[in-house]
Image (cartoon, coloured by chain):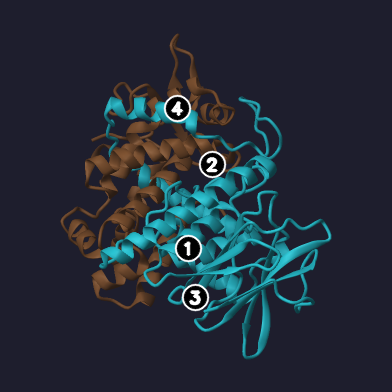
Chain colours: A cyan, B brown
């Protein structure tokens, strides 16, 4: 990521003010997702986080150690076979070496494999949300696996683990809604949105893979017209997901168009899918 | 109680089987004993783990599990949940060891960062905030300060953190403790203390900046 894309001015100052709370894991999920979106673009912010992480880890190391039961280790090693390891970005790691890890930050923990929605009062609602969260989580995990193998470990980026965390957060929001629409040319798109969080994400399945010349572009469309919400490409299996850039508000229309690679300022083709919210 | 990263080999290290450590501020060297008495730095074990070395991972686990479990258990009162989370933390360490960069920090802070985040996520996912408030309320929020650590020659990073914490104004210390040891968000702290959110943010920020200054951590 180009540092010039990172936060600046008032936004950077505000984020730097949040860095201590972030390092203490005291931000709520949405604040955290927002913070982590900005983190890769700002070495200054990353340095702040690293310094406060060192303090937080000192607090953690001050807790009296407690030996876990021996069965825990046995259970752990039983799980290793089905737990693929991320590979270093800079080629095979030398066990004693100091191979470069390009991104992410050493302190960025990974997204939990299972997404647990926050408890809600209504059991039916909880069940349906749980199903959704699990579906999203496994779809995302499948994509992640592919992405990790192809481009190496990636916390950041549109399908990074940070984004996956945000996706889970949206799906687990108490007011999460999902809407599915057909895509012209085959496949379907599901929009998951939370008015409370002001965020949404799409999960697509069966979409046609575009060549190098073209990309899918997402749009938030309201009275004032379409605003780009980012681009995405689909792998060979036609399945991927993407958290939309920008704020979601109920009533907005989400559109998908096919645009020249890199995306467009304004749509240049008819949408292949339109979702009313 | 002594649960320090001592600056010299410690004769007894209860609860930290198989490991001893030496520390200079900013340069932590934890080591794990191997059969045959050959010791390896935890950082090397973590790097070897990234390459799929299960023996290294096993040594790393033996040397660090008690610290990880201790922290997780502090945040999660329920023992079964704490065990589950601890196992998840190590599984995550196994899977993401490639992200560890020894140039930017030591193995223990890296593991504890994973552990804290996982534990906090579990706390928030599995308990209502009311339950959590009750739980936090009945527990000692002050950092356990080691009486023995007054000895000046024991240069211990985390004990220095604990000591620096005691020098903060009580209000700042309380907020940092509620956040880190209580697993509370800023908003939850504000509700719990019945003070404005902005006040909590300021206390956390000022307190952490003061700790950083006291400990001479550079950005």
| Mark 1 residue element | helix
Q: Chain of mark 2?
A: B
Quarter holding the C terminus of chain B? bottom right
Do the numbered discs 3 and 1 sit on residues whose CB atoms are within 8 Å?
no
Mark 2, residue position: B105
Mark 1, residue position: A32
Q: Residue at x 58, y 41 (%)?
A: B99
Q: Nearer the viewer, mark 4 or mark 3?
A: 3
Q: CA distance from mark 2 to mark 4?
A: 16 Å
Q: Nearer the viewer, mark 3 or mark 2?
A: 3
User: What is the crowding at mark 2: few (fewer than 14 residues within 10 Å), some, or many (at least 20)?
Assistant: many
Q: Are marks 2 and 4 on the same chain?
A: yes
- Residue A198 numbered tag: 3
Mark 4, residue position: B60
Q: Chain of mark 4?
A: B
Do the numbered discs 4 and 3 sit on residues whose CB atoms are within 8 Å?
no
Q: Chain of mark 1?
A: A
Do the numbered discs 2 and 1 sit on residues whose CB atoms are within 8 Å?
no
Q: Could you tell whether A173 is left or right of A214 in the image?
A: left
- In the picture as drawn, the residue positioned furthest to the right comes out as A213
């Amino acid at each position: 990521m180009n540092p010039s894309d990172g936060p600046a001015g008032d936004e950077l100052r505000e984020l730097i003010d949040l860095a201590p709370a972030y390092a203490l894991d005291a931000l709520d999920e949405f604040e955290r997702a927002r913070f982590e979106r900005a983190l890769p673009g700002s070495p200054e912010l990353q340095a702040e986080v690293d310094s406060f992480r060192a303090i937080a880890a000192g607090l953690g190391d001050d807790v009296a150690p407690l030996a876990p039961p021996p069965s825990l280790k046995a259970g752990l090693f039983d799980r290793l076979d089905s737990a693929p390891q991320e590979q270093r970005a800079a080629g095979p790691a030398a066990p004693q070496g100091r191979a470069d890890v390009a991104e992410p930050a050493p302190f960025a923990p990974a997204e939990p494999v299972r997404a647990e929605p926050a408890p809600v009062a209504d059991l039916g609602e909880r069940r349906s949300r749980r199903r959704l969260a699990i579906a999203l989580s496994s779809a995302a995990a499948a994509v992640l696996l592919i992405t990790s193998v192809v481009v190496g470990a990636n916390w950041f980026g549109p399908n990074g683990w940070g984004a996956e965390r945000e996706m889970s957060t949206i799906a687990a929001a108490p007011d999460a809604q999902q809407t599915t629409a057909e895509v012209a040319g085959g496949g379907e798109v599901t929009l998951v949105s939370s008015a409370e969080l002001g965020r949404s994400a799409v999960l697509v399945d069966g979409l046609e893979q575009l060549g190098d010349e073209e990309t899918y572009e997402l749009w938030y469309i309201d009275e004032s017209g379409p605003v780009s919400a980012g681009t995405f490409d689909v792998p060979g299996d036609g399945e991927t997901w993407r958290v939309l850039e920008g704020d979601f508000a109920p009533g907005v229309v989400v559109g998908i168009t096919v645009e020249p690679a890199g995306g467009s300022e304004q749509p240049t083709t008819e949408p292949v899918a339109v979702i009313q919210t | 109680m002594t649960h320090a990263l001592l600056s010299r080999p410690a004769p007894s290290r209860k609860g930290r089987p198989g490991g001893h450590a030496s520390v200079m501020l900013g340069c932590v060297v934890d080591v794990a004993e191997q059969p045959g008495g050959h010791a390896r730095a935890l950082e090397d074990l973590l790097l070897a783990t990234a390459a799929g070395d299960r023996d290294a991972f096993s040594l790393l686990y033996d040397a660090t599990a008690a610290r990880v479990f201790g922290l997780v258990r502090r945040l999660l009162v329920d023992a079964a949940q704490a065990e589950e989370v601890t196992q998840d933390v190590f599984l995550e360490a196994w899977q993401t060891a490639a992200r560890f960069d020894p140039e930017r920090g030591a193995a223990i802070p890296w593991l504890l960062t994973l552990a804290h985040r996982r534990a906090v996520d579990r706390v928030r996912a599995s308990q209502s905030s009311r339950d959590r408030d009750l739980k936090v309320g009945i527990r000692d929020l002050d950092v356990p300060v080691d009486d023995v650590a007054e000895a000046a020659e024991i240069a211990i990073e985390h004990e220095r953190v604990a000591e620096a914490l005691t020098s903060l104004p009580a209000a700042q210390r309380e907020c940092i403790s509620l956040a880190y040891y209580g697993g509370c968000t800023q908003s939850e702290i504000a509700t719990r203390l019945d003070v404005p959110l902005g006040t909590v943010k300021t206390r956390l920020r000022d307190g952490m900046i003061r700790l950083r200054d006291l400990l001479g951590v550079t950005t």
